Amino acid sequence: MRHKESCAWFEELYKNNYNQSEKIPWASMRANAHLLEYLQKNPACEKGCKPKAIVIGCGLGDDAKAIANAGYATTAIDISESAIAWCKERFIDEDIEFLVHDVFELPSEMIGAYDFVYEALTIQSLPPQFREAIIRAIASLLAPKAEMLVIAHVKDESSKRAGPPWPLVQEELEYFIHAGVSLEALEVVQEPSHISDQKFKALFRR
Ligand SMILES: C[S@@+](CC[C@H](N)C(=O)[O-])C[C@H]1O[C@@H](n2cnc3c(N)ncnc32)[C@H](O)[C@@H]1O
């Protein structure tokens, strides 16, 4: 299966449930608490003038808003046209660049261009055969010395649950290291859910 076929259901879901966020399983309509904690410790002003940030698979855009409000020049991408249209409507007054992009087909000007890269729950939303490729694509966005925060469910090895999503095992985080970034900090946080009870919170640096 090509990755496009594995991603197509996202557009259907957002389009068929436009403006009904309660039908989007991951949409809490607020920023991720781990991201907020990172931003509190890393306000943009300590990193120079308007560092550039990118959100991968931004969904309904709350994380992008939090990053923009912390002072970063923020771009947020999603493969779903409807999700991006919805973000633009929700955050019409915010200075955020919301773009329809497939993370596997990013334009060359985005490569190595960002001081902060944020990804939550997108890697796991594709079947495991695409894991290394999506991790390489995301890691390629980091500028020298950039940081990247990755949030993903930890695979429960005792569970027979079929995807989507397909939570990660720790060894898969090594694909980031193969892609040229180093693991600065890794936490496994307890967050019980129907997917798994733990999440990886991983901070990388180029
Ligand atoms: C599980 S949702 C997570 C959304 C958001 N990051 C969050 O934490 O709420 C995964 C998101 O990734 C997007 N996505 C899936 N495949 C993608 C791809 N190849 N390129 C860009 N975005 C993609 C989906 O449309 C969806 O919005």
Image (spheres, helix red, strand yellow):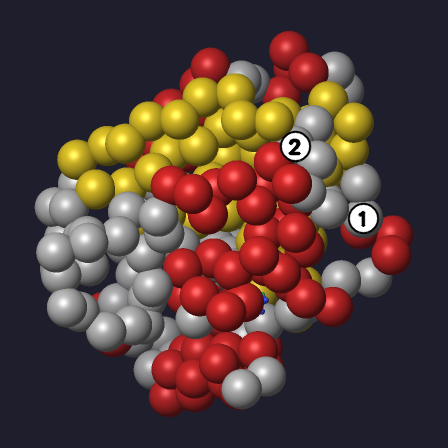
Q: Position of residue 133 (x, y in %)?
A: 62, 60
Mark 2 or 1 closer to N-term? Answer: 1
Q: Tell me which residue sits at (65%, 32%) in the image.
A: 181
137 to the left or right of 110: left
Mark 1 C-beta to ligand 1 under 8 Å: no
Instruction: Identify whether 131 is placed above or below 140.
Output: below
Q: Position of residue 104 (x, y in %)?
A: 68, 66
84 to the left or right of 110: left
Alpha-carbon neighbours of circle 1 within 10 Å: few (<14), some, or many (≥20)?
some
What's the amino acid at mark 2?
Answer: Val
Q: Is residue 24 visible?
A: no
Of badges 2 and 1, nearer the viewer stands 2
Q: Which residue is mark 2?
A: 181
Q: Secondary structure at mark 2?
A: loop
- Quarter of the image for residue 186 reads top left
Q: Tell me which residue sits at (21%, 42%) in the image.
A: 198
Name the residue furthest top: 46
Name the residue furthest right: 109
Instruction: Identify whether 95 is placed above or below 72.
Output: below
What's the amino acid at mark 1?
Answer: Ile
Alpha-carbon neighbours of circle 2 within 10 Å: few (<14), some, or many (≥20)?
many
Q: Position of residue 112 (x, y in %)?
A: 80, 41
Which of these two is toward me, 203 or 115? 203
Q: Which residue is mark 1?
A: 111
199 to the left or right of 182: left
Q: Tell me which residue sits at (74%, 16%) in the image.
A: 48
